[in-house]
Image (spheres, helix red, strand yellow):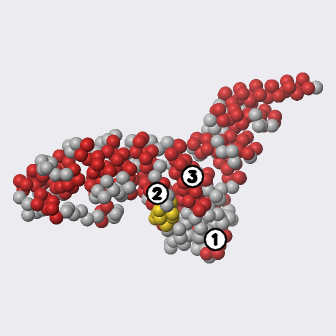
């Protein structure tokens, strides 16, 4: 049950004569039509209250007329922080997605996070931009991030903004192990987990965070995982490893996007190897931001054709990872690398590796052509020196 479901809606005593069950039906019908000389906030409150009237005729009339209230009347009401959250939620769910009033609701600090999570699923670029810019809400509600991660209008830049913020919070958090959940999987001693999680992470213990001068509830601290997703493992056989990966894939597949994001930041090698191939861009991006990811992992990912083009692009645009020579070689030979990036990295390749690219049938033709020209130029330059 969400917080909105637990909200009680009451009206001021002075308005009960229009909406109370003792009020004559005709009075309630007149009020439902908005035909009362009331202040904007009182008018909106009365008509909204009647959308919940037990009489079907009154309720239908109120629902029909509440959305006909002029925008000039609604705007100041929907921008007030003390407007009832249920009223704000009603309009968020019933106004057109491109209505300017949707933005007013999204900017209202009195709007419940549950309502914002709904708005985060709407196909409105302005709404998505407003919501991704509100760090307090992103920290306070994982449901908002879940919705943004599934919204096709959440751009790569916005996704990166979210991940960078969560990564920052991860590094600010104290070093504290996650309590293991009961159930299947290997139990480990607390000391063992702590040794594995030497890097700071968004762990239990940091239940509130001071952000923008305010103490904010940290919803990410409530996400915890069993030790089998946190502690790196050594396998005795290939079969054991494959069985474990199948088991972990099934468990991770049932997780929400936010759970996968945090796991991408704090999880073990086995979890990262699964999450880096996740279809959601935000999840895969989180893995590359993990404080626990190693250079050898990035080398393997840069060569992989089972990860998304977005993952390859992020590696190609990372100054940190592309300092590694083998990563550059892998990116040039990976057909998922953007052609412009692949051609740029050709300049760093040794002649032997460049020659292999020039003969390759597995990379885009423009890269092969550029490799041949560069190799020829180098050979001509070498001959001229001799």
Residue at 31% in and 54% down: 80
| Disc 3 versus disc 1: nearer the observer | 3
Residue 70 shows in the view:
yes
Mark toward the start of the polypeptide (3 vs 1) = 3
Q: How packed is label 2: few (under 14 Cα within 10 Å), some, or many (20 or more)?
A: some
Q: Position of residue 115 (x, y in %)?
A: 35, 54
Q: How packed is label 3: few (under 14 Cα within 10 Å), some, or many (20 or more)?
A: some
Q: Residue 136, which numbered label?
A: 2
Residue 53 versus residue 338 in the image, above or below:
below
Q: From the image, tell me which residue sits under label 1.
A: 194
Q: Nearer the viewer, residue 338 or 19?
A: 19
Q: Nearer the viewer, residue 207 or 43?
A: 43
Is residue 141 shown left or right of residue 342? left
Mark toward the start of the polypeptide (2 vs 1) = 2
Residue 275 shows in the view:
no
Mark toward the start of the polypeptide (3 vs 2) = 2
| Disc 3 versus disc 2: nearer the observer | 2
| Disc 2 versus disc 1: nearer the observer | 2
Q: Secondary structure at mark 1?
A: helix
Q: From the image, tell me which residue sits under label 3.
A: 164
């Amino acid at each position: 049950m969400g917080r909105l479901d637990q909200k009680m809606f009451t009206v001021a005593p002075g308005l009960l004569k229009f909406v109370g069950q003792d009020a004559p039906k005709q009075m309630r019908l007149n009020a439902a039509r908005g035909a009362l000389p009331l202040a904007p906030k009182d008018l909106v409150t009365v008509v909204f209250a009647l959308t919940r009237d037990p009489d079907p005729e009154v309720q239908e009339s109120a629902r029909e007329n509440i959305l006909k209230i002029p925008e000039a009347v609604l705007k100041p009401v929907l921008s007030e922080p003390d407007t009832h959250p249920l009223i704000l939620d009603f309009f968020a769910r019933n106004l057109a997605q491109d209505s300017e009033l949707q933005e007013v609701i999204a900017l209202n600090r009195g709007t419940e996070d549950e309502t914002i999570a709904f708005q985060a699923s709407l196909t409105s670029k302005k709404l998505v931009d407003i919501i991704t810019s509100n760090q307090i809400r992103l920290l306070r509600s994982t449901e908002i991030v879940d919705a943004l991660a599934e919204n096709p209008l959440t751009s790569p830049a916005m996704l990166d903004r979210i991940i960078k913020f969560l990564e920052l919070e991860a590094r600010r958090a104290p070093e504290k192990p996650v309590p293991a959940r009961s159930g299947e999987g290997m139990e480990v001693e607390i000391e063992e987990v702590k040794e594995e999680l030497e890097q700071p992470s968004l762990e239990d213990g940091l239940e509130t965070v001071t952000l923008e001068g305010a103490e904010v509830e940290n919803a990410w601290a409530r996400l915890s995982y069993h030790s089998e997703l946190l502690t790196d493992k050594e396998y005795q056989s290939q079969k054991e490893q494959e069985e474990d990966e199948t088991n972990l894939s099934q468990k991770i597949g049932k997780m929400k996007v936010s759970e996968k994001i945090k796991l991408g930041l704090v999880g073990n090698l086995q979890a990262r190897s699964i999450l880096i191939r996740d279809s959601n861009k935000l999840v895969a991006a989180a893995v590359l931001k993990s404080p626990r990811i190693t250079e050898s992992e990035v080398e393997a990912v840069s060569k992989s054709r089972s990860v998304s083009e977005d993952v390859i692009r992020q590696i190609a645009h990372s100054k940190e990872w592309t300092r590694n020579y083998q990563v550059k070689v892998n990116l040039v030979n990976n057909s998922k690398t953007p052609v412009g990036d692949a051609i740029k990295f050709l300049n760093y390749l040794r002649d032997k590796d460049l020659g292999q690219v020039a003969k390759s049938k597995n990379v885009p033709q423009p890269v092969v052509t550029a490799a041949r020209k560069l190799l020829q130029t180098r050979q001509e330059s070498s001959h001229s020196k001799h």
